[in-house]
Amino acid sequence: MSPTVLMIMISSLATGTIITMTSHHWLMAWVGLEMNTLAIIPIISTMHNPRSTEAATKYFLTQAAASAMILFSSMINAWQTGTWDITNLSYNPAHILLTAALAMKLGLAPMHFWLPEVLQGSTLTTALIITTWQKLAPMTLIFMTLNNLSTTTLILLGLLSSIIGGWGGLNQTQTRKIMAFSSIAHLGWMITIASIMPNIMILNLMIYMIMTTALFSSLILSKSKTIQDTTATWTLSPTLTIMMMILLLSLGGLPPLTGFMPKWLILEELVAQNLSPTATIMAMSALLSLFFYMRLTYTTTLTLSPNTAQTKFKWRFKPNHMTLFMGTSSTVSIFLLPLTPLIIQ
């Protein structure tokens, strides 16, 4: 893809999300979502192989169906109430349709099947965009319509997503599919707390985006597409290996790393709301996710792949990728836990 076309696509992608995030009218929100979808389709299919074409087609179909459902729910709401205001969604069938559509857009269980397939068919950089930036617009719509959405439905969706996100990742060997199931599980945590404490949901989304960006940057730098590839990271850079290990443990939610903060706050809030069974199931599902993070950690740091070369390390050329962004996001992903009291005030 030529730099000019890529710049236009990335600009449209950013503009689409920003239009949705700043709109008060349902039609403008829908326009933003459509711009966003149409901009990322060429980015997914840049590789010109059958897998990427299939991924782009699957992404287009699911996102177009979800956008149509959002438009339909806003239309029937406008028909009943006479207003197109996003915050004024008071017609019950419109709530149900919107919840289903946004769950489909985000890749929440049970509408999650497209996400691992799409990530597997795209490059690591595109997978990073889909798992981070593409979550912003639907999450904003959820945040704006929270007062009218069913708390029970959101908690059930969140529970199911966190369980399936943990369970689905157990048997995977591809890093992109593991990150897809990790995304489903993290979104489950966010949706569970959304209607109870929206501030924690936003905090969780921010931390998840930073941690995922840091880990994907490491995977892009080491060109690790499968678990087997991660075993060769040591020969590229021992420092990167250690960083990846700590990042994976942070994503798993282990103290004293940043990833523990949102899980701790969410479980604390669920128990405070007398939802102890929900909190218990969520904590148990986090163990499932932790297992596949630990497996990746083990292959990255504790196993050395058979090296045919006589040298201990690979030749060090000047890196093609900017590592400043990776360094910044990795630092935040590890050391943010002591700032918890400051953040939640």
Image (tube, helix red, strand yellow):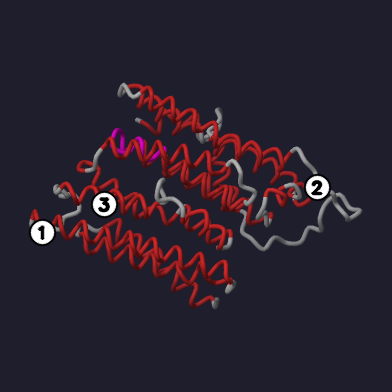
Quarter of the picture holding the C terminus: top left
Of label 3 and label 2, which has the lower sequence position? 3
Of label 1 and label 2, which has the lower sequence position? 1
The image's mark for residue 98 is 3
Span highlighted in magenta in the image: 189-199
Quarter of the picture holding the N terminus: bottom right
Which label sits in the foreground, 3 or 2? 3
The amino acid at mark 3 is Leu
The amino acid at mark 2 is Ser
Q: Secondary structure at mark 3?
A: helix
Q: Position of residue 329 (x, y in %)?
A: 54, 47
Quarter of the image where one finds residue 24: bottom left
**Numbered circles on residues, count:** 3
Q: Position of residue 160 (x, y in %)?
A: 41, 39
Q: Which residue is mark 1?
A: 79
Q: Which residue is mark 2?
A: 305
